[in-house]
């Protein structure tokens, strides 16, 4: 298989095109890897364990020593701690405050606040706050600063 890489100037121009004779497990794995969703997370909802793809996660929050995983419209409990999830997920996931990890692929827009923090609006219209200590890295990873 040939691989071509072309460097572009902005994040909006990034894309991956896969040309294949048929969709094999390897091709599906490559697509999931590119989308950041090759990993699954064990979560709990209504006393049932579910495995959700990382690409479905919008953000993860820790409140009162409990971890919650948020998808488009569902909130799940999770047994992992934030630092474990941060290591497991990598890629487009990053810490945005002491108690939250955000999926950068789910950010629609950001707005700077006078306090030095950033409000990030996600594609499901939820807003999360990015703490001052994480602003520089979030901007760098989003390609805006």
Image (cartoon, rainbow, N blue to C red):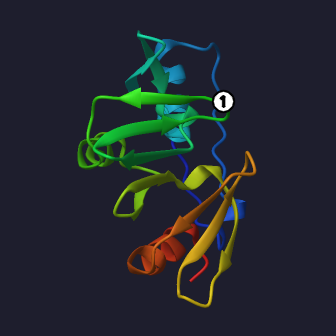
Q: Residue at x 45, y 14 (%)?
A: 50
Q: Is residue 93 visible?
A: no
* The quarter of the displayed image where residue 134 is located: bottom left
Q: Nearer the viewer, residue 16 or 20?
A: 16
**Residue 93 in the image, given as x and y percentages of width and height:** 44, 51
- In this view, 44 is above or below 142: above
**Residue 78 in the image, given as x and y percentages of width and height:** 36, 30
In this rendering, position of residue 87 left or right of residue 118: left
Furthest residue to the front?
Answer: 64
**Residue 119 in the image, given as x and y percentages of width and height:** 63, 70
**SS at badge 1:** loop
Furthest residue to the bottom?
Answer: 114
- In this view, 63 is above or below 27: below
Which quadrant is the C terminus positioned in? bottom right
- In this view, 2 is above or below 130: above
Q: Residue at x 49, y 40 (%)?
A: 36
Q: Residue at x 28, y 29 (%)?
A: 79
Q: Residue at x 61, y 29 (%)?
A: 74
Q: Nearer the viewer, residue 26 or 82?
A: 82
Q: Where does label 1 land, which residue?
A: 19
- In this view, 99 is above or below 141: above
Mark 1 crowdedness (10 Å alpha carbons): few <14, some 14-19, many ≥20: few
């Amino acid at each position: 298989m040939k691989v071509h890489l072309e460097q572009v100037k902005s994040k909006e121009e990034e894309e991956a095109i896969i040309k294949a004779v048929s969709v094999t497990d390897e091709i599906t794995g490559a697509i999931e890897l590119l989308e950041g969703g090759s990993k699954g997370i064990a979560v709990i909802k209504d006393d049932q364990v579910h495995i959700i793809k990382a690409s479905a996660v919008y953000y993860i929050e820790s409140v009162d020593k409990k971890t919650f995983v948020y998808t488009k419209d569902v909130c799940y409990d999770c047994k992992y701690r934030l630092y474990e999830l941060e290591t497991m997920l990598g890629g487009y996931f990053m810490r945005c405050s002491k108690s939250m990890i955000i999926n950068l692929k789910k950010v629609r827009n950001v707005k700077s606040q006078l306090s030095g923090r950033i409000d990030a609006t996600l594609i499901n219209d939820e807003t999360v706050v990015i703490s001052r200590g994480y602003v520089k890295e979030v901007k760098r990873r989003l390609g805006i600063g």
